[in-house]
Amino acid sequence: MTFTSLLEQLGGLGLFQWLHILALVAPILLTASHNLLQNFSAAVPPHHCRLPPAPLGAGQTGNLSSEGLLRLWVPLDGGHQPERCRQFSRPHWQSLEPNTTSPNGSLPATEPCRDGWTYDRSEFEATIVTEWDLVCDSWKLTQMAQSIYMAGVLVGAMAFGSLADRFGRKALLSWSYLQLGAAGTATAFSPNFSTYCALRFLVGMAVSGIILNCMSLVLEWSPTRTRTMTGTLVSYSATLGQILLPGLAYALPNWRWLQLTLSMPFFAFFGYSWWFAESARWLVLAGRPEQAIQVLKRVARINGRRAEGDGLSIEVKELSPRLGSRGRDSSHLLSSPSPPSSQRFATSFAYYGVAMDLQGFGLRVHMLQLLFGMVDIPAKLLSTLAMSRAGRRVAQVTALVLAGLGILANLLVPTELAALRTTLAVLGKGCLAASFNCVYLYTGELYPTAIRQTGLGGGSTMARVGGIVAPLVKLTGEQMPLVPPIIYGSIPVLSGLVALGLPETRNRPLKDTVEEVENRWVPLSPPSPFPGTSPSF
């Protein structure tokens, strides 16, 4: 008897599985919001130099309106808006006279803002940008903050992935809930930018632990025939989190309250995590068959299959794999010729390159974030259908290539056509969401239970490297505006072509040991883009 047939005997996708999945995916709603939180907590509102408290010629300015004082001290940019980072060295009286220019056509002397900035607070009451003046020469610090957060996600992927294979999924998941609740709440009270970055690093670590262990527990408790559906439920919970975020940000325009609202619920998630069932697959591989039997009997009882659960002892002991396979070197599996890690990197790199630049499209951030979230619904549905009918590999390749082409197509659209540029960006983001939907499930199916968390952690590490690099690539756009979109679009296309060499896993039972994978492995040469024509695990 295989573990898959054992799950079917105990009720398949029964009441336990549904309760378990719902309890696991609820926190994913808010972890997705934390990933994109900086679109709102670090939003840059319109701003200009704060007017000197006692300008020269104050007696002459007493009757001037605020708009007049602004023109007196702040030059206009090319769009006839107040310059954001420069002010006149002294009052420029000529600017108050209509249709006047400077002598000889020269610009009046300007200098960097001396007394800070004045911000338009009509959309955002307070952000880390307005609180710590992260504008002008300091604007790169916001990109650094996002990279630090992603570095935390990367470290969490490396640490929690391997630790979960050693100590179990449930313990690491509970700890991640507690860490995110504590660090996220503390972030809302950050006294300075350095503390904010350090706490966001810890939040990023916890996000990795939650996503990795949630996905593993969902997959390992799901029968083969329902894995696509249950994996997609996890993905859709992240989509709902993206849709929830702009509504919360609109209701809570102060970044501290928004941060606190998205963090406090994790204490409740930690409180009920004791109810989760440890992966019986992992317990057997860890040499704890008696604990596995108790967990399976509990599952059988909840699913209304008590009689089947009472006779499990013999079946589980027969299922116990050769534990020596856990000690074997699995590095060749984690670094296969065409690893899923490259797809994780490309998807995350392009995703955060597009999703974290909402203000660059010139539309209201809340509305654009809502559009970016809504497009995931049909995108992930199509991805799910493609994975079920055509296979994981075809779905992965198609999503990545279309995403890259959508991003590259924007290079041909004039900046004046904002609606068309936004449409292409939304479609590209939808394809990247479909790629995420596929790659999470695909990676979990490619690796055996013995090293699944390590494999997921390795893939997540590469994804977070992409998330770290994405905002840094954006910085190059200051001098070379075409470089970021070219890179953001090219990487997914190349990665999609590389994915042609991955094996197909559709309708294949999960493997539990490294030996099981090795016994089914056949070199992939040459790769084929068509499902069912290449060997698989």
Image: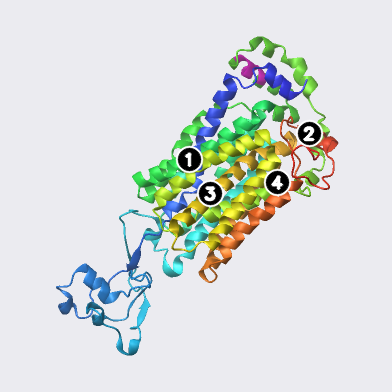
Q: Regarding mark 4 in the picture, which secondary structure is present there?
A: loop
Please report the bounds of the magenta region as a residue range.
Answer: 296-301
Residue 182 in view of the camera? no
Mark 2 vs 3, N-terminal side = 3
At 26% across and 82% down in the image, what residue appears?
100
Is 363 on the left or on the right of 332, as rendered? left
- Chief SS of the magenta region: helix
Which amino acid, by three-letter code, is at mark 2? Answer: Thr
- Measured in 3D between alpha carbons, the distance from the residue under mark 1 to the one under mark 3, in whole angstroms, is 19 Å
What percent of the width, then of the height, locates residue 190?
A: 42, 53
Is 198 on the left or on the right of 115, as rendered? right
At 80% across and 31% down in the image, what residue appears?
323
Quadrant showing the N terminus: top right
Which amino acid, by three-letter code, is at mark 4? Answer: Pro
Mark 4 vs 1, N-terminal side = 1
Residue highlighted by disc 2:
513
Check if residue 312 falls in the magenta segment: no
Task: Residue 340: give its label.
Answer: 4
Compare residues 92 and 503 and report the one nearer the observer.
503
Badge 2 vs badge 4, beta-carbon distance below 8 Å: no
Q: Quadrant of residue 163?
A: top right
Is 286 on the left or on the right of 18, as rendered? right
What percent of the width, then of the height, locates residue 241?
A: 48, 40
Which amino acid, by three-letter code, is at mark 1? Answer: Gly
Task: Residue 241: give its label.
Answer: 1
**How many neighbours does mark 3 have within 10 angstroms: few (below 14), some (14-19), or many (20 or more)?**
many
Compare residues 413 and 485 and report the one nearer the observer.
413
Residue 52 drawn above or below residue 493: below
Mark 1 vs 3, N-terminal side = 1
